[in-house]
Amino acid sequence: MWKIVVAFVIFAALTMYVLSKGGDIDMSGEKHGIDAGHDAKPAATAPADAASAPASEAK
């Protein structure tokens, strides 16, 4: 039993070390609204961009 506790403590310490060295890690959970920080294009423009690329190369 004591080996399990020691292994857990070592694993927890290693995890905290890796997370502290990881840089900007957000552990606050799922975000909604303006502060979500997504930089994605709207879904309607993504297929048009992908479809126009091969056509422009063919000319």
Image (tube, rainbow, N blue to C red):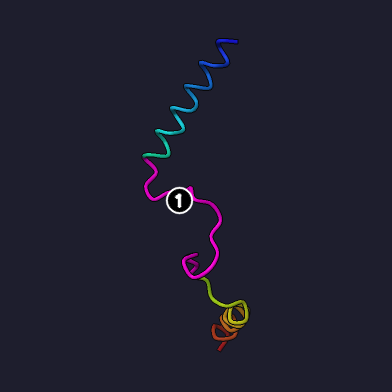
Q: Is residue 36 above or below residue 19?
A: below
Which of 42 and 59 lies nearest the eye of the viewer?
42
Say which residue appears at 44% left-offset and 29% top-offset: 14
Residue 19 sits in which quadrant?
top left
**Residue where numbered disc 1 is placed:** 26
Q: What stretch is highlighted in magenta?
A: 21-38
Answer left or right for 53 relative to 25: right
Q: Main secondary structure of the magenta part?
A: loop
Q: In this view, does 6 lie above or below 40?
A: above
Give the image location of residue 8, x and y in percent.
53, 22
**Element class at badge 1:** loop
The quadrant of the picture occupied by the N terminus is top right
The quadrant of the picture occupied by the C terminus is bottom right
Say which residue appears at 38% left-offset and 39% top-offset: 20
Give the image location of residue 48, x and y in percent.
61, 83
Residue 32 sits in which quadrant?
bottom right
Give the image location of residue 6, x and y in percent.
51, 15
Say which residue appears at 59% left-offset and 84% top-offset: 52
Answer left or right for 34 relative to 43: left
Q: Is residue 11 above or below residue 53?
A: above
Q: Which residue lies furthest to the bottom in this view?
A: 59
Say which residue appears at 62% left-offset and 81% top-offset: 44
Q: How many marks?
A: 1
Q: What residue type is labelled 1?
A: Asp
Give the image location of residue 31, x and y in percent.
53, 60
The verdict on residue 8 being magenta is no
- Disc 1 crowd, CA 10 A, few/some/many (<14, 14-19, 20+): few
The verdict on residue 36 being magenta is yes
